[in-house]
Amino acid sequence: MKAAVYSETGPPSVLRYEDVPDPSVGPGTVLVRNQAISIEGGDVLHRSGGELGRVPHVVGYQSAGTVEAVGDGVTSVTVGDRVVTVGVDGSHAELRVVPEGFTWLIPDALSTDDAATAPVPFGTAHDALFEFGRLTDGETVLVQAGAGGVGVAAIQLAKRAGARVLTTASSPAKLARLAELGTDAGIDYSEQDTVTEVLRLTDGRGVDLVVDTVGGSAMTDNVRCLAYRGRCVSVGEVGREGATTIDVGMLRPKNLTVVGYFMGMEMLMSPRCHDVVARVLDDLAVGELHAVIDRTFPLSEAAHAHAYIESRAAVGRVLLLP
C-alpha cells in the first residue's frame, strides 16, 4: 500500500510518499481501506518531535473508509461497512488496522469525509465541556483557538447547550467564520489581550469555563480569565511551547479548578466515550452539528498538507484523500 511515512521527526518535509507493507488483521481488529484521513493536531506534533514506534513510521490518529476484513471475535462491523476509526498511529495510509472498539459505523446520511473529522475533535470537545468542565445552561465559556478542530466542535456543542460562547482566533476573518457556528463574541489574539477582552466582555466577572488546546503560557491567562469557581480543561499543546507551570496559589482565592484531559485514555477506560462519539455522528447526520473541512489534499501531498496546517490558515479540519 501507499503511505505518507517518515524515518525521523522534523518539519513537514520529512514526510515521504512510499510503498509499505499492508497491515494484517488479527483477532478483535478491523482492516479498513481509507477514503478520508483527518489530520489531527496530535499528528502534526508527533511528526515534529514524537517517538517513532517503527521506522518508517506512519503517523495519524483518525480516518474513515470501508471495512475490508475483520478478525476473529469482531461482531459490531462487517465487510463493506463504512466506518470512522481512531488509533495511536497509521491513518496516513491507504489501509489501516484498528481495534474493533475504536471504530464507529457511519450513518447513511453522513458523508465519509464529514465522518472522518468527528471522533477526536467532537469527543474531546464534548468531554471537556460537559464530563470534565461541567458546563450548564446560562454559563459562559471561552474556547481558545476556536478555528481548530476541537474549537469548531466546542463552539457548536456549547452554544447548543445554552452557553454564551467567547472564542479566540488569529484574525477577523477566522472570527467571522466562527460567528457562523455560534460564537457570541470573538477575540483576535494577534491584536488584543485575551484576558483584558474576556474581563471586558463579562463586565469583570470572567468566564465559568475555558476549553484550552493551546497550552504553554496561555495556561496562566486561562486562570486569570476564570470567574469564581471557574474551571479550565486543558486538552492539548497546539501552541508548541511545551509544558508550563501553574502556581496552585493562583487557584485558591477564587476556588478554581484546572483539569487535564486526554481522549485516548478515556476511550480505554470507559465505554461512555465511545457512546458520546456515536451520538455526535448521529447529530452530524441530521444536521444538528456541522463538520468544517477547510481543504483537502491527495495523500501523496501529505507534506504540503502538514505545512498548510502549520501556517495556521485553516479553519476546521484538513483532509488527505488516498
Image (cartoon, rainbow, N blue to C red):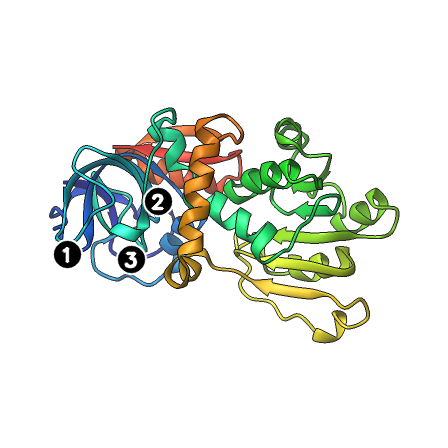
Disc nearer the start of the sequence (3/1): 3
Kindly report the distance in space between the C-alpha atoms of the residues bearing marks 1 and 2: 21 Å
- Neighbours of disc 3 within 10 Å: few (<14), some (14-19), many (20+): some
The amino acid pointed to by label 1 is: Pro
Which of labels 3 and 1 is toward the front? Answer: 1
- Neighbours of disc 1 within 10 Å: few (<14), some (14-19), many (20+): few
Disc nearer the start of the sequence (2/3): 3
Residue lying furthest front? 75
- The reply to whether discs 2 and 3 touch (Cβ–Cβ < 8 Å) is no
Residue 92, quarter of picture: top left
Quadrant of the drawing holding the C terminus: top left
Q: Where is residue 82 in the image (x, y as percent from the top left)?
A: 27, 33
Left or right placement of residue 269 versus residue 222 in this view: left
Q: Write down the residue under mark 2.
A: 62
Q: Where is residue 69 in the image (x, y as percent from the top left)?
A: 13, 42
Task: Report the residue at 19% width, 50% height from top.
Answer: 74
- The reply to whether discs 3 and 1 touch (Cβ–Cβ < 8 Å) is no
Q: Position of residue 190 (x, y in %)?
A: 69, 42
In this rendered view, identify the residue nearer to me: 291 or 178.
291
Kindly report the distance in space between the C-alpha atoms of the residues bearing marks 2 and 3: 21 Å
**Badge number at residue 27:** 1
Q: Write down the residue under mark 3.
A: 8
Which of labels 1 and 2 is toward the front? Answer: 1
- The reply to whether discs 1 and 2 touch (Cβ–Cβ < 8 Å) is no
Quadrant of the drawing holding the N terminus: top left
The amino acid pointed to by label 3 is: Glu
Label 2: state its secondary structure: strand
Q: Position of residue 23 (x, y in %)?
A: 14, 49
Task: Report the residue at 68% width, 34% height from top.
Answer: 183
In this rendered view, identify the residue nearer to me: 149 or 188.
149
Q: In this view, does 85 lie above or below 249?
A: above
